Amino acid sequence: MPTVKDVTFNLLRQLGITTVVGNPGSTEETFLRDFPADFDYVLALQEASVVAIADGLSQSLRKPVIVNIHTGAGLGNAMGTLLTAYQNKTPLIITAGQQSREMLLTEPLLTNIDATQMPRPWVKWAYEPARAEDVPAAFMRAIATATQQPAGPVFLSLPLDDWEKEMPDAAPPRTVGTRQAADPARVAQFALAINAARNPVIVYGADLARSEAWEEGIAFAEALGAPVWAAPFCERTPFPETHPHFAGVLPAAIGPLSDTLKGHDLVIVIGAPVFRYYPYVPGAYLPDGATLLHVTDDPNMAAKAAVGDSLVSDAKLFLASVRPQITTRAPGSSAPLRAPAAPADLAQMPLTPDAVFAIVAEMAPEEFVVVEESPSNVPQMQDRLRIDRPDSFYTFASGGLGWGLPAAVGLGLGEAASGRNRPVVCLMGDGSFQYSVQGVYTGVQHKAHVVYVVLQNEQYGILKEFAELENTPNVPGLDLPGLDIVALGTGYGARSMRADTADAVREALAAALSFHGTSVIVVPITRRLGSLLG
C-alpha cells in the first residue's frame, strides 16, 4: 500500500508542481527522505531567502511553488518575506514540519505551538491535518485556495511522523477557476459613468500584470483618450512607460496624490489599492468635483478603500467586458505626457544614482528583467528605466526590505526554466543588500543569470529623507560605514567587483551580462539626498 508521502508526491506530480524551495530542518527530513528524482530542490541558507526565492520563481512561471521551512523557528525567520508574498499575491504553498504527534501534548523542543496561528494574517489559509491520511487532500485544498483570486500564500503544518503511514491512493487532482468575472450589471453602471465623464484619468496597478492584461490596458486607455498613472508603490509594471498616454507614478501621500489628479472629474482605478499611502501628508482624498471607480480582484481591498465605488473582478476580464461599452474618444494630447530624461552627468564623482541607472539602460539588452530594492533612488530609476514590456519589472508590495535580493534569484531560475533566458538586473541599496544576503549563494549554486548592481552611499538614505520630512534630526543608526560588499559577494561565490567611474560601470556590466551566472557590482554613489515626495 502506498504511504502518505507517496500519495502526496504523486498528487503534486499530476498537478505539475514539482519544485520545492527550502532550508531543511530535523522536522522536515522525513518529507525530504529519498527525494524523488523528477522533483527539483532549491536550497537557500535562511528561510527569509527561501520564501522570496520561491516568490520570484512563482511569479516568473505563473504557477504555485512548494516552500519547505523548519517548524516554528524557520517560520519565524520567514515571516518578513511571507508578508511580502501575501501582498504580492503570490500563490506559495508554505509547508513546515511539526513534531511527532505522540509528543505534541508535552510541547517538546521545536514544537510549533498554535501552528496555524503563527503565520496569520499573512496567509489565506493555515491548517494542520487532523489525521496523517488527510495530508494529500490538504495539499489539494491548499493549492486551490492559493491560486484563486486574490491569489496568495497558504500554510500547512505537517507532523514529521505522518509521511510513512500507509493509506489508499485517494487524492485525485482537481482544478479550480482562478479568475473571477465582473457582475455585468455593475460593469454597465461603470461604463455609463465612464462615458459621462468630461475628463477621466486612469490609474493602473499590478493586477494588470498578474492577470496578463497588458494589451487590454493599452486598448482601454487609447479608447478613452485618457492619461494613465501607475499606482503608488506598484510592485509590477501595469502599462508601457514609453506609451504617449503614460503620465508617471502617482505620489504616495494623500494630499500630493489628490493634487496630481486635479482637473479630472473621474478617477478610474484598476488593479490597485485605493491607495497605498506613505508617508502621511494630509489633504483631500480626491480633487474637488471628482469621483472614483475602483476595480480589484480582492474584496478586502474593495471594502477598505477610503473613497469610490468598487467592483470585484479580475482586471483582464473587466477590461474585456467594459471595452465594448465605452464610447471611443480622441486623446487629449498627441504629445507624450512624460518628458524624456535629460542627459546624465557621468563625470560627477562619486556617481549619482541617475548616472548609474542611465548606464544600466544603455548597456542592458533589449530583453531583460529589473528587480528594485533601493528605496531612496526609485524616482531616478523610474525616470531612466522606462519599462515597456510586460513581466519585466518586479519589486515588493510590502515595503519590507530583504525580498529583492533572493527574489531576483527566483526570477533568474524562472527565466532558465521557461527558456526565456533574460538576464535579471537587481538594483540594490547597500543597506538592502544586507537583509537576505545569503540568497547570493543560491544564485551562484544554480548558475542563475543575476546581476546585482549595489548603490553604496553608506547610509539608509530613505530613512534620512523621512527624517527631513518628519523633522526628526539626530536619529541614530542611519549610517553604514565599513561594509565590504565586494568581499560579501565573493564569499558566497559570486563574481564581484567595485566600479567607481562611468567607464568602470560599463565594463563591469558588460562582463556580468555576458557571464551566465551571478555577479555583484558595487558602485559608490553620492551621499546627497533627494526629496521623499519628489
Image: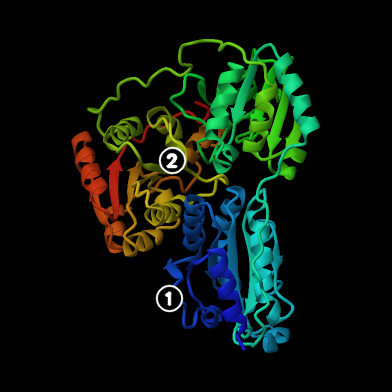
Coordinates of residue 379 in the picture (x, y in percent): 45, 30
Q: Amino acid at mark 2?
A: Ser
Q: Is residue 232 above or below residue 107?
A: above
Mark number for residue 308?
none
**Residue on which disc 1 sits:** 37
In this rendering, the label closer to the viewer, 1 or 2: 1
Q: Which three-letter amino acid code belongs to the residue tagged 1?
A: Ala
Residue at image point 61% right, 30% down: 253
Q: Residue furthest right?
A: 185
Residue 235 on image: x %, y %: 53, 41
User: Can you tell which quarter of the image residue 371 is in?
Assistant: top left
Q: Which residue is mark 2?
A: 392
- Nearest to the observer: residue 221 or residue 502: 221
User: Element type at marker 1?
Assistant: loop
Asked if one can make out residue 227 in the rendered structure from this viewpoint, the answer is: no
Find residue 512 and report its horizontal and vertical position in percent.
Answer: 25, 48
